[in-house]
Structures are given as C-alpha cells and as structure tokens.
C-alpha cells in the first residue's frame, strides 16, 4: 500500500512531514516547571557515568558522508522499483520527523529549565538528534526532497504530554528506535547485497546514541520510582501497547521496504518487540506477552482495520464516512481487548544500566 500523495517534490515531502495522523510521528511539548523539579540524585553515580559518556561524544565524527556515498546511491538505489522508492522516501521522511521531534522537545526543555542535570542531558540529546535529522535530510536532498526544518518546526501541530507521559513514550521510542536500527543493521551486515542504500551503514553507531538516550530516561524513572508503581503501571501498559501497535501497523503499510532488505514485516516487528521487551525490563515492571496468540491476532486485526479505513477514506462520500467510522470503532474495540490481555510481571534489577549488546 502506497502513500496517498506521491512524494516527488520538496513541498510534498514537507506536507508528508507536517501531516498529523494516528500513525505519523508527532511533535511534543510538556510542563517545563515540572521537568525543572526532577531529582536524579538517588542514582548519582550512574548518572555521572552517563554524562561522561555524552561529554566524550564518541559519535562526533560519525555523521559525515563518505566520498563513495553519492556513487552508491546512484549505482544501487537507482535500480529499485518506483513503488519501492516511494516507500523508502516515506521511511526517510517519517524517520526524519521522529528524529527532529526529539531534537525540538529536548531543545525546548533545555531552554526552559535551570536544573543543571536536566539541562545538561537535554543539551546532549538535542545535539545528537540534530545530527541524526540533518543526516537523513541530506539523503532526501539527494532527490531534491530536502525538508525545511525551521518551517516544519513552525507549522507542525504539537501534542502536550505531562512529563511522566513524555518519559514513558520517549523512553520507549528511543529503545524501540535502537532495536529497529540494530535489527536492520545486522540483517544488512549479513546480506550486503540487500543494502540498497548506503545510509544503513551508519545505523550501528547511530543506534547507540538512541540506546543512550533511552538509558537517560530509564535513570530518571528509576530515580523517581513512584513513576513505575501503582496506577502508573496502567499508563506503562497503555504506552507499550500504543507504541508497539503503531509500529506494527505502520511497518505493515510498507512491506516492500522490508522485503528489499530480505526481511518480512511481521518477523522483523516481532524481533524488534523481543529486543525491546528485554531492554525495558530495566525500568518497567511489566511487559506485553508478545507470543500470546491473542496478542498476535489482535495486531494483525489492527492492520486489517487500517487497510479498511484507508479504503473507506479513498471511497469518500457519506457511505465511505460511515464505513470509516465503523472501522474506527472496531479498531478501538480491538485496542481495548489487547490492552486487557494479561501481561508479564517482573522485579526490577538493582543495576539500571544495560549495554547495547544486540
Ligand atoms: Fe536519533
Ligand atoms: Fe534519540
């Protein structure tokens, strides 16, 4: 299934980045005063070790293109089909939007807090995300599809999240981002003939940045353990499911992208879920039972519902609108059923930090 709009100009690429749908990456804003009051002193020594790593900046020279980059794009990427090209461009645009979303959020928190720990962390993370976003944008510029990031910052809608929702959602998106990039990197490392674009060679060191960003939120949450107990566990379950389900549906709308890498969307997604489940045990007391047949059937149904909603939207008119509303209700019911599936419980480890060992 392809995009409703063919991405053949910079304006259309920007339009795609600005659009707000259930599945597209969002921009966030939060309560800066509450961020300012955060205290990480309960985990001071782990925090300081992490800050030293940020300061060491081992990726400072990583996001530069090699002289062969353009040549590889010309030789290899020019061979992919037009449909595949569209899927890859959509992938680049949604990846750029998420990277830039992190950059804006971290930078706004940096500008609006005095708390030295949080201020320092946000400055480092904004630095990393800005590099990631510009690196992807260079690849869009190769096709004349560069996005004006200043313009995107001004025009895209912002969603307000309380700090605790930012922690759950951003922690997860950093860790799942790591799991996605490392899974692709390992696949293409084994099958270099499937590496249809040179950008994937950058994913290994790149995703270590994302892993460390996730570690930062893990330390914030573990230093404030009330965020991980009681009624908050229901919010954690909600964010786990929302993030997993969104990724599943979005990836299944781009089957060619995975196929071209020698992957298949369902098995790729479950590999990513498995890695993310293992990592999130450092902080979340629950994880989703991803191997339960009802869980798998529920996600597959969500994707089916999404395809039906897209068809109803394309049909338009009164009947199309009604059908769309019907499928939206079915989607909500499926999500609620998935939410009440039993989850796995575990005790949190004494040591919070983990190594990116996948
Ligand atoms: Fe990033
Ligand atoms: Fe990140």
Image (spheres, grey):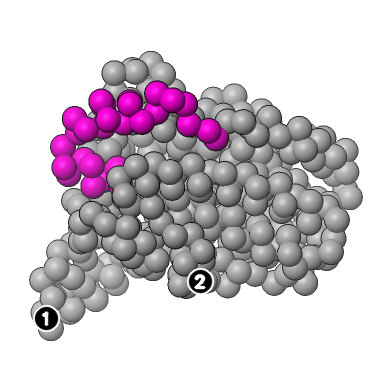
- The residue carrying mark 2 is 154
Q: Is mark 1 within 8 Å of ligand 1?
A: no
Residue 73 placement, left or right of 228: left
Q: Quadrant of residue 230?
A: bottom right
Disc tally is: 2
Q: Quadrant of residue 344?
A: top right
Residue at image x 34%, y 18%? 192
Cβ atoms at labels 1 and 2 below 8 Å apart: no
Q: Residues within 10 Å of mark 1 (few under 14, many from 20)?
A: few
Mark 1 or mark 2: whose residue is earlier in sequence = 2
- The residue carrying mark 1 is 317
Residue 256 placement, left or right of 171: left
Q: Is residue 223 magenta?
A: no
Q: Is residue 74 magenta?
A: yes
Residue 188 image offset from top left, x and y in percent:
37, 23
Residue at image x 39%, y 28%? 69
**The magenta segment:** 63-89
Q: Quadrant of residue 199?
A: top left
Residue at image x 27%, y 38%? 257
Residue at image x 44%, y 60%? 148
Tag on residue 209? none
Query: Is residue 182 visible in the rendered structure shown here?
Result: no
Query: Is residue 308 visible in the rendered structure shown here?
Result: yes
Q: Quadrant of the C terminus?
A: top right
Give the camera-side residue of 29 and 309. 29
SS at badge 2: helix
Residue 252 image offset from top left, x and y in percent:
28, 46
Give the camera-side residue of 60 and 355. 60
226 to 182, vertically: above or below: below
SS at badge 1: helix
Could you give the CA–CA distance between mark 1 and mark 2, rounded to whole angstroms? 33 Å
């Amino acid at each position: 299934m392809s995009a409703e709009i063919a991405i053949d100009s910079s304006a259309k690429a920007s339009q795609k980045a600005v659009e707000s749908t259930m599945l597209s990456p969002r921009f966030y804003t939060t309560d800066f005063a509450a961020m300012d009051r955060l205290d990480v002193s309960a985990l001071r020594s782990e925090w300081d070790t992490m800050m030293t790593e940020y300061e060491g900046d081992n990726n400072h020279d990583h996001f530069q293109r090699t002289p062969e980059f353009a040549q590889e794009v010309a030789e290899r990427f020019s061979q992919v089909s037009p449909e595949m090209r569209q899927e890859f461009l959509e992938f680049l645009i949604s990846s750029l939007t998420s990277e830039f979303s992190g950059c804006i959020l971290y930078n706004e928190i940096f500008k609006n807090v005095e708390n030295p720990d949080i201020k320092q962390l946000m400055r480092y993370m904004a630095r990393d995300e800005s590099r990631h976003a510009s690196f992807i944008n260079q690849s869009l510029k190769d096709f004349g599809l560069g996005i004006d990031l200043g313009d995107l910052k001004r025009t895209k809608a912002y969603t307000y999240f309380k700090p605790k929702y930012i922690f759950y959602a951003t922690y997860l998106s950093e860790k799942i981002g790591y799991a996605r990039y490392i899974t692709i990197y390992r696949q293409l490392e084994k099958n270099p003939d499937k590496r249809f674009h040179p950008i994937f060679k950058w994913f290994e060191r790149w995703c270590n940045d994302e892993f460390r960003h996730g570690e930062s939120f893990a330390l914030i949450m573990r230093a404030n353990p009330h965020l991980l107990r009681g009624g908050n566990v229901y919010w954690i379950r909600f964010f786990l499911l929302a993030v997993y389900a969104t990724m599943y549906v979005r990836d299944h709308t781009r089957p060619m992208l995975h196929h071209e890498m020698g992957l298949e969307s369902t098995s790729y997604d479950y590999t990513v879920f498995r890695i993310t489940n293992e990592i999130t045990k450092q902080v979340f007391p629950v994880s989703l039972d991803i191997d339960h047949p009802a869980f798998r059937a529920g996600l597959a149904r969500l994707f089916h519902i999404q395809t039906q909603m897209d068809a109803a939207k394309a049909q338009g008119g009164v009947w199309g609108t009604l059908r769309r509303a019907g499928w939206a209700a079915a989607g909500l019911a499926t999500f609620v059923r998935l939410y009440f599936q039993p989850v796995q419980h575990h005790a949190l480890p004494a040591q919070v930090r983990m190594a990116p060992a996948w």
